[in-house]
């Protein structure tokens, strides 16, 4: 048995909690997570006030940058609006509101579900976001369905700004068992792959991870394992206080460019779906 809520308070934000986890969503910004606490410890931060620079938000119908800030549609180049530092970056969903949302509570979990329509792209897309919050893990999903009778090619992803330090001198460490890094030119993948060395950095790079899992460890505090339905991640560590582990369904610029087989062709009968598990393990002193 579950209980459903469509409003929690007069606040423009929505709180959802279960067990040791408490999240605050902003329906005006695609249901992005503004605050994500585990056992009272805030995990997310902000590198600035631009919508690209804070919280945890969805990326679609593309993730990352587009070559020449455009994509092909029916043989013609369609320019996309530049939204950050000279780039059309991280898609169109991140700064658009949800149409509606619900919260379902049960004895096993709390679930936040957001519904959004992307109408300013080459195809109208209906999007469903789900955050299923358990005691020590969260399962998220993004589902995208085009309204037209044809197919649409999309890339989906999440962009969390995690803090590098959670106190107790807990400077974040990354664990990536095996991966290949996509060589880039002017921030766009060239098609070449090289072995990834986690000790190099700082990174602003795309990885193919066969295990589909990357772990962040804050010594003496917390371990977070991010396991995705797809093998693609973007890793950003160039900010002084934050790092971004971005699970994605495909490579940047792959709708038209290199690694095109990673773009998902979705339809009304076969939506594009990405699922991600975020699993916590407390680490004692």
Image: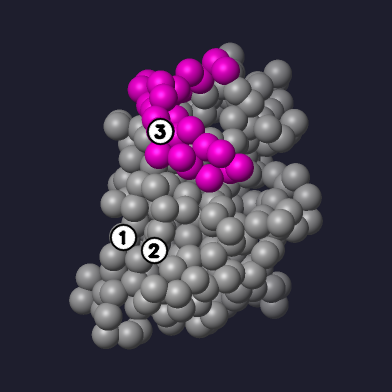
- In the image, residue 170 sits, relative to residue 275, either above or below, namely above
N-term mark: 1 or 3: 3
Residue at image coords 35%, 66%: 153
Residue situated in front as seen by the camera: 194 or 177: 194
Residue at image coords 65%, 21%: 170
Provide the residue designation for mark 2.
Answer: 154
N-term mark: 1 or 2: 2
Q: Does 194 lie within the magenta span?
A: yes
Provide the residue designation for mark 1.
Answer: 264
Is any atom of residue 162 visible in this view? yes
Residue 155 location in percent, x, y? 41, 58
- In the image, residue 91 sits, relative to residue 8, either above or below, namely above
User: Is 194 positioned to the left or the right of 58 in the image?
Assistant: left
What distance separates the C-alpha of mark 1 from that of mark 2? 5 Å
Residue situated in front as seen by the camera: 15 or 57: 57
What distance separates the C-alpha of mark 2 from that of mark 3? 22 Å
* Residue density around tag 2, few if under 14, some if 14–19, many if 20 or more, within 10 Å: many
Q: Which residue reaches farthest front?
A: 75
Residue situated in front as seen by the camera: 101 or 134: 101
N-term mark: 2 or 3: 2
Magenta residues span 175-200
Question: What kind of element bears circle 2?
Answer: strand
Q: Quadrant of the N terminus?
A: bottom left
Residue at image coords 22%, 70%: 270
Question: What kind of element bears circle 1?
Answer: strand
Residue 167 location in percent, x, y? 71, 26
């Amino acid at each position: 048995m579950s209980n459903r809520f469509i409003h929690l308070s007069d606040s423009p934000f929505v709180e959802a909690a279960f067990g040791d986890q408490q999240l605050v969503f902003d329906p005006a910004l695609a249901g992005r997570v503004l605050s994500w606490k585990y056992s009272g410890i805030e995990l997310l931060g902000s590198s600035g006030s631009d919508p690209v620079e804070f919280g945890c938000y969805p990326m679609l119908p593309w993730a990352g940058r587009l070559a020449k800030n455009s994509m092909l549609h029916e043989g013609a180049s369609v320019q996309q609006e530049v939204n950050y530092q000279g780039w059309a970056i991280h898609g169109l969903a991140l700064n658009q509101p949800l149409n509606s949302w619900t919260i379902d509570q049960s004895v096993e979990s709390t679930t936040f579900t957001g519904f959004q329509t992307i109408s300013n792209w080459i195809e109208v897309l209906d999007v469903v976001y789900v955050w299923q919050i358990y005691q020590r893990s969260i399962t998220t999903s993004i589902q995208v369905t085009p309204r037209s009778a044809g197919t649409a090619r999309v890339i989906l992803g999440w962009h969390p700004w995690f803090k590098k330090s959670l106190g107790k001198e807990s400077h974040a460490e990354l664990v990536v068992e095996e991966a290949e890094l996509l060589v880039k030119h002017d921030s766009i993948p060239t098609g070449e792959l090289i072995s990834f060395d986690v000790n190099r950095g700082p990174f602003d790079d795309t990885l193919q991870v066969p295990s589909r899992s990357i772990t962040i460890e804050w010594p003496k505090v917390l371990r977070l394992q991010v396991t995705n339905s797809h093998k693609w991640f973007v890793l950003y560590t160039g900010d002084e206080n934050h790092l971004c582990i971005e699970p994605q369904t495909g490579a940047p610029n792959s709708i038209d460019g290199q690694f095109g087989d990673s773009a998902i062709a979705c339809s009304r009968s076969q939506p594009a779906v990405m699922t991600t598990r975020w699993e916590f393990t407390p680490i004692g002193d």
